Image (cartoon, rainbow, N blue to C red):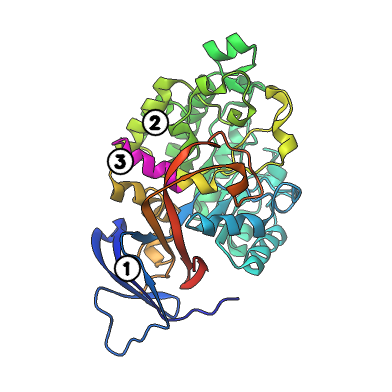
Amino acid sequence: MNISIAISITGGRIIDPANNIDQVTDLHIENGKILALGKAPKGFKPERTIDASNQVVCPGLIDLHARLREPGQENKATIASETFAAVNAGITTLVCPPDTDPVTDTPAVVDLIRHHAEMSDNARVLPLGALTQGLEGKHLAEMDALKEAGCIGVSNANQPISNTEVMRRAMEYAASQNMTVFLHAEDHWLANGGCAHEGAVSVRLGLPGIPEAAETIAVARELQLIEQTGVRAHFCQLSSERAAQMIARAQHDGLPITVDVAVHQLFLTEMDIGYFDSQCHVRPPLRTQRDKDGLRKALAQKTIGVICSDHQPHDADAKLAPFPSSEAGISGLETLLPLTLRLVDENVLDLSDAISRLTQQPATVLGLLENGLGGSLGTGTRADVCVFDPEQYWELNADSIVSRGHNSPFIGWEMKGRVTHTLVAGQLKFGQ
């Protein structure tokens, strides 16, 4: 393991939305924590100095949804490979859903994930525990034991809980444990094995469709149950304008709800499927131009607080099958930051707000911010730091992707903004 040393990061534009800081100054780190901003304290002698001139220095990025494929699908990726890709992309904390094999429904599996993450010694991994045993939607998982083992929240991933009574009891149990429930809103029966948004494109291509109502009806049910149980809930990877409007109303009424969107939903639509491009097979599906614009509006209005990668690395064969038979998902760690920065260039967000959606806001969802464990560069907080050059142009190609998964519809896109250094708890994990 690397040893935390005294480090000064000099001359960078420090953007720390949690503390309303946006200024060119120095950052000093000691014993794995932020020691000071600005002038170095008396007697402080850095063992390493990083020149961040003309670069942005911000808190380490936090990704709320990344499948690391371990345990169970090590042929696609491993915790070691994906946490290494994460630090190359400025991401210092990853949240992994519970649909591993075996399912993350026992403390033993949680311990396995945490042990492998510690041995990999790259980005930090925070597992979500299963909401129901085996994700089968029948019997509640032992959430108290999962919390004790280190789960940051609970989720049933993409597996349905069709029985509303089970969902209600699961929310009540989670509320009693003060755990956030991470929800993937999709009505299993309406989705009905579809693979694309139900509309003109799916009809033209003869693809089984997933209607917008599959999301909105599920959101409506969950909102009613959240109101009844008082559980803290986070909606994951929202895909439709209508669902965003429903959640905005619920937030206005005071329900304890947060929301994230996968970054690809802010740039791609059903039209990008073209002639059965399986790289655009994602779940929830790419929807209409109106939905894309609506999600951007909800992001700007802060209904959607967090942008995530929804990282799903696949081996090459997974995308070679016919579109409906190909596996859904995009390898998204390395495009999370540059695509978010593109939203700044397109006047959707300003730079500080964009960085907030990758740092302060996800840290707040996870309860890290208040404990000084991420999302901030405040004095005394854990020194998770990302340094990036906001003006560097580069092209995404399969050979340059660090993740084991090279499945991305953004291959060939010119990106702007590249990470130069990543520190996790004061240890330099990426950069020279």
Q: Quadrant of residue 345?
A: top left
Residue 431: x percent and y percent?
49, 65
From the viewer's perspective, is the residue at label 1 or at label 3 nearer?
A: 3
Q: Is the residue 51 above or below the residue 109 in the image?
A: below
Residue type, mark 3 in image: Leu
* Marks 1 and 2, the one that precedes in the sequence: 2
Dot 1 corresponds to which residue? 378
Q: Quadrant of the N terminus?
A: bottom right
The reply to whether residue 254 is in sight is no
Determine the main secondary structure of the stretch shown in magenta: helix
Dot 2 corresponds to which residue? 295
Q: Which secondary structure lies at badge 3? A: loop
From the viewer's perspective, is the residue at label 2 or at label 3 nearer?
A: 3
* Marks 2 and 3, the one that precedes in the sequence: 2
Q: Is 368 displayed left or right of 55 in the figure?
A: right
Q: Quadrant of residue 256?
A: top left
Where does the magenta region start and end? Answer: 337-348
Q: CA distance from mark 2 to mark 3?
A: 13 Å
Q: Is residue 73 one of those drawn in magenta?
A: no
Residue 4: x percent and y percent?
49, 79
Dot 3 corresponds to which residue? 349
Q: Which secondary structure lies at badge 2? A: helix
Residue type, mark 1 in image: Gly
The reply to whether residue 164 is in sight is yes
